[in-house]
């Protein structure tokens, strides 16, 4: 590549938005929140101007946040945009930094003169107060205002939670009712309640105790809000009318005479949609370098589709030349679901995939102890490369050109970096060293140039992995064998009964959104690297008819996480002036 063919656009007032001249040594000891607080934020109307929008085009939530109304979206303009997906190797406790990489890449593309918007998911309070922390990037590759985005933001999660729980209340009310009853068999109802917090004590419970005026006793529980089918629906809906129709299609259970019951039979989809009238609109914020960022929706990739909303992605594509987006966890989860479900549903076709990796992650997959990942260990690194190799193969199966992005850490040695570069060369795959945490967009210029070259050379020809018309088992087994590398799939008796229910309801044409551990390519979190010869065990298959997919649940997957012994909330506080500390 000829570096001189790219024009680097330097912001007019770098002191306000760019602190990328800082060295890693200078940054050491500063938290993401401390870095974020050093940035002088631009008014959100100024960010909107970068998208050729004026103040009347947006709905402001204070000075630094805004909602984007659906009227802005233009499908024809969106088709002209270049969509770039950021994924990663299998996650490790050390973290890989997809969000940080996505933001940094968008900054780099903007510096190279490409009008770019990063489109991300909203953080869930469960991880924020649990073990993972926030989801707004890190270092000098963040979206702002960091505190607001990581906490209640614009209230989208709350609205999703209320809409979900309204349906739960209506179901139980109908079971209790004598005058407006559908005759629902309480034993067949799988719809739980949700809350946006990690709380293992709520996974399983019995409700309706206290006598005849307190409801009909039945077993149920809580899921985390990110796992709600309402979240999945909001992220796949095209507009409010489509949203309402999908809400009505939610499968509730059966009547005592074995007739299926949907949310529309309870006449609740209109009220549920009304609660989501603002939540369905994407949120506009800014990056550290003062570029636009759209943040919307937040499903987890191990238990749902793991990507931001179709509306947000198309909104960014309407307003930009390039859109950078990410899909949760490794390419076996978020990327597969992004490509097989979201892209097919919305008619999207990514031009390139950035596969984020770290030296630390590959050493961990190669058997290195978590406590020793900052020490040079070329042997463990080489043993961990098969995990990266498999994820590259997975991306290439979709006909998309990948580029490896090495998310550099201070502890990485030249010898270790060279091993990954040699691996990429021998496999004829592009690779770039990225220093986005320490340098923001400046640290992503090499990566950005690779992405531009892939796009301009038309190096990708996206094709989905399977046909939605295939049988449910064929779809599951295609993903299990081709993406995970399994030798086969086993189904429990419950899963086989679920398959018969799906057939009886006429839902076999839906795609599959497999719930699987993010820690391994298999359904066993202890099998690191690139396991082979394993069997995927499908425990049950849930129906998400409103979202428009089926959820085969593998292994020991749960949809309500628990808190660690020392949750992140122990370090978060606020002073009398309203300054928050402890977020990371």
Image (cartoon, grey):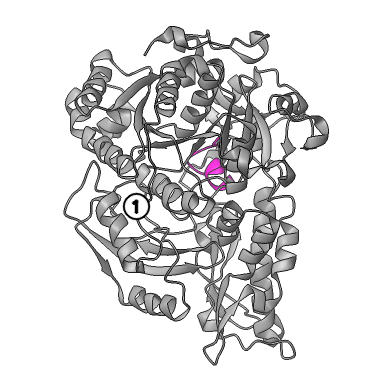
x%, y% of residue 68?
A: 72, 40
Residue at (74, 54) in percent of width and height: 277
Asked if 343 appears above or below 15 in the picture, the reply is below
Callout 1 secondary element:
loop
Residue at the extreme right of the image, as rendered: 56
Image spot of residue 4 (x, y percent): 45, 7
Q: In terms of depth relative to the viewer, which is nearer, 82 or 226?
A: 82
The residue segment tinted magenta is: 125-135
- Is residue 226 part of the magenta span, yes or no? no
* Residue at 52% from the left image edge and 89% from the top image edge: 258
Q: How many labels does the image show?
A: 1
Position of 254 with respect to 398 (left or right) is right
Q: Is residue 412 left or right of residue 135?
A: left
Res 213 quadrant in image = bottom right
Residue 534 % position (x, y): 20, 56
Q: Residues within 10 Å of mark 1 (few under 14, many from 20)?
A: some
Residue 29 visible in this rendered orientation of the protein: no
Instruction: Return the x and y of residue 300 as percentages of the image width and height.
Output: 49, 50
Residue in view at x 62 percent, y 83 percent:
216
| Residue 262 drawn above or below residue 11 | below
Quadrant of the rendered image containing residue 44: top right
Which residue matches tag 1?
465
Q: From the viewer's side, name the closer residue of 253 and 11.
A: 11
Quarter of the figure with the C terminus? top right
Towards the viewer: 468 or 548: 468
Q: Can residue 510 be seen in this view?
A: yes
Query: Would you place residue 310 above or below residue 432 in this image?
Result: below
Which quadrant is home to the N terminus? top left
């Amino acid at each position: 590549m000829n570096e001189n063919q790219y024009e680097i656009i330097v912001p007019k007032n770098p002191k306000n938005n760019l602190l990328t001249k800082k060295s890693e040594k200078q940054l050491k000891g500063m938290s993401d929140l401390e870095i974020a607080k050093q940035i002088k934020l631009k008014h959100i109307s100024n960010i909107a101007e970068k998208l050729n929008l004026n103040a009347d085009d947006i709905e402001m939530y204070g000075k630094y946040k805004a909602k984007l109304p659906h009227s802005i979206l233009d499908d024809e303009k969106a088709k002209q945009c270049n969509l770039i997906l950021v994924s990663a190797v299998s996650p490790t406790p050390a973290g890989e930094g997809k969000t940080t990489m996505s933001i940094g890449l968008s900054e780099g593309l903007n510096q190279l003169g490409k009008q770019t918007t990063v489109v991300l998911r909203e953080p869930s309070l469960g991880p924020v107060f649990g073990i993972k922390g926030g989801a707004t990037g890190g270092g000098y590759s963040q979206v702002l205002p960091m505190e607001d985005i990581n906490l209640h933001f614009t209230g989208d999660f709350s609205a999703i939670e209320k809409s979900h729980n309204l349906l739960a209340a209506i179901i139980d009310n109908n079971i209790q009712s004598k005058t407006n009853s559908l005759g629902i068999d309480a034993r067949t109802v799988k719809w739980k309640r949700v809350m946006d917090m990690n709380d293992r004590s709520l996974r399983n419970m019995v409700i309706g105790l206290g006598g005849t005026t307190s409801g009909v006793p039945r077993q149920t529980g809580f899921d985390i809000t990110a796992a709600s089918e309402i979240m999945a629906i909001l992220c796949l809906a095209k507009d409010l009318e489509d949203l309402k129709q999908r809400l009505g299609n939610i499968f509730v259970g059966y009547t005592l005479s074995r007739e299926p019951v949907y949310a529309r039979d309870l006449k609740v989809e209109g009220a549920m949609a009304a609660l989501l009238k603002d939540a369905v609109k994407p949120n506009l914020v800014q990056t550290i370098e003062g570029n636009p960022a759209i943040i919307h929706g937040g499903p987890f990739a191990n238990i749902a589709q793991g990507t931001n909303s179709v509306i947000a992605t198309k909104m960014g594509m309407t307003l930009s030349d390039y859109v950078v987006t990410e899909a949760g966890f490794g390419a076996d989860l978020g990327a597969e679901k992004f490509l097989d479900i979201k892209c097919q549903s919305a008619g999207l076709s990514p031009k390139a995939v950035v596969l984020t990796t770290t030296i630390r992650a590959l050493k961990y997959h190669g058997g290195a102890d978590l406590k020793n990942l900052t020490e040079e260990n070329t042997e463990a690194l080489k043993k961990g490369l098969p995990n990266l190799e498999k994820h590259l193969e997975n991306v290439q199966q979709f006909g998309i050109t990948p580029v490896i992005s090495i998310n550099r850490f201070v502890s990485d040695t030249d010898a270790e970096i060279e091993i990954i570069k040699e691996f990429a060369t021998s496999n004829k795959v592009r690779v770039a060293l990225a220093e986005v945490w320490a340098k923001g967009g400046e640290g992503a210029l090499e990566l950005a140039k690779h992405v531009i070259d892939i796009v301009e050379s038309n190096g990708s020809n996206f094709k989905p992995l399977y046909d939605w018309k295939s049988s449910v088992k064929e779809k599951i087994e295609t993903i299990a064998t081709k993406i995970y590398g399994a030798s086969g799939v086993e189904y429990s008796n419950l899963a086989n009964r679920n398959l018969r229910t799906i057939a009886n309801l006429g839902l076999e044409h839906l795609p599959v959104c497999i719930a699987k551990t993010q820690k391994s390519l298999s359904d066993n979190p202890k099998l690191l690297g690139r396991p082979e010869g394993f069997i995927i065990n499908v425990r049950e298959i849930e129906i998400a008819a409103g979202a428009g997919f089926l959820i085969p649940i593998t292994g020991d997957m749960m949809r309500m996480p628990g808190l660690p012994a020392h949750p992140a909330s122990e370090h978060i506080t606020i002073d009398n002036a309203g300054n928050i500390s402890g977020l990371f």
